[in-house]
Amino acid sequence: MCGWFFNASSENPMLMLGYQVDPFTNRSSGEILTTRLLPLIGNVNRKPLFGGSINFRHVRNPLINFVVVSTTEGQDQESVLKSIFHHQKPRALECVLSWCVKTIKSTYNEATYTEIIQDRFINTTTGPFPWTFIKPDSNSTDEVAKVQYLQDITVNPHALEGQGNTSSYGMSNQTAFNILSIFDDYLPSFATLANNASQQYMKFMFWDENPWLREFPENPWSAPNNVTYRMERLATVMTNIMRQAANDTTFGQSFNEETYIEVRWVWLTLPVGLLGLTLVFLAGTVIRTSMEKDRVGVWKNSAIATLLYGLPDEMQRKITDSQGHGTPRSKAKELNVRMLPTKGWRVSGHVLSPIVRKQKPPPGWI
């Protein structure tokens, strides 16, 4: 055998990727192992390999824990054979599927249901090996040894430091065993390729006397496929099946999300205050001018145009020149200022003293 092994230095190494070599021709013969899925707990005797796990020994009661080894090249046959015969280092991944409790925030808006996973809890408490070996009765000749799954599944996210006496979530050992047995059909399994054939085959169901064989045109476990994404999809599908297969309705509180507009009035203090002061000032001006009896109140609609546009320079000079003749407030009510579209500013009311036109002296006058 030539290839990559687990426990290569031990007495019983396990070939994970490689081929068989003919001792007479020194060439490959038979089938070529391109992918292998090895469970770390055997499906017949339930004996653990490497302690049942390599990197996930802290996970309690996992569903499956296996190692998948494949080539690092593409899926086409030429690339796979090139990687194997050139003895390129393969890709080895450990995959685990375990029980967990998820905290989900669900929303329903505009006929769309959305779930957001806020937290995920996995039981990492220490415990004995879940499989128990039962010896046969020495007095009975028909009884054989048995391996049973005797532990109930317990996942309690509310327990302090994971040491709770009761659990909010879990299942019986019989239900757990029925789910575990599903993966015995697929783990272990092999993907092989013959030298004189272009089709890849998958061998599985090794618990049977004659393992099953099927065509395997696309290998989802080899590069460049994402094995992590495939395991996540498997976990999601199993979760949805368990949630939808329940016979009882889950009781709990339901919330409806509503959207409100929040107004921060502190930002409106300045503009609202200025507007209020302006209205107070305007009202005060109107009241004050209307109450003037002994003095002349100057309150005219023509003042708006004057405030907006102002008097022209010529008219301001006339008013300034007339101060010598007096401009008493008693005549202020008689002052009208208008701005005509064609004639410009018009001031009436005889406030301004008439200006006498000075005659120019005749020529030669000294």
Image: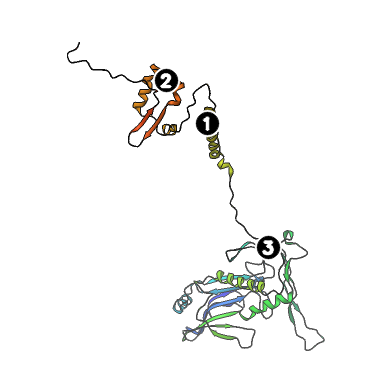
Judge from the rendering whether residue 308 lies leftward or rightward of residue 98; answer left or right.
Answer: left
Q: Residue at x 58, y 71 (%)?
A: 233
Q: Earlier in the sequence, mark 1 or mark 3?
A: 3
- Front residue (pair 86, 156): 156
Q: Residue at x 60, y 86 (%)?
A: 211
Q: Identify the residue under disc 1.
A: 286
Q: Identify the residue under disc 3.
A: 254
Q: In this rendering, which labeled residue sits more in front, label 1 or label 3?
A: 1
Q: Which mark is residue 327?
A: 2
The kind of residue on which mark 1 rests is Val
Q: Secondary structure at mark 1?
A: helix
Q: Secondary structure at mark 2?
A: loop
The kind of residue on which mark 3 rests is Ser
For residue 165, above or below residue 293: below
Q: Residues within 10 Å of mark 1 (few under 14, many from 20)?
A: some
The kind of residue on which mark 2 rests is Thr
Q: Earlier in the sequence, mark 3 or mark 2?
A: 3
Place residue 221 in its image quadrant: bottom right
For residue 5, above or below residue 263: below
Q: Residue at x 44, y 20 (%)?
A: 328
What's the CA distance linking mark 2 and mark 1?
A: 23 Å
| Extreme-right residue of the structure | 139
Residue 227, percent across and down? 55, 71
- Front residue (pair 170, 268): 268
Q: Residues within 10 Å of mark 3 (few under 14, many from 20)?
A: few
Judge from the rendering whether residue 43 lies leftward or rightward of residue 86; answer left or right.
Answer: right
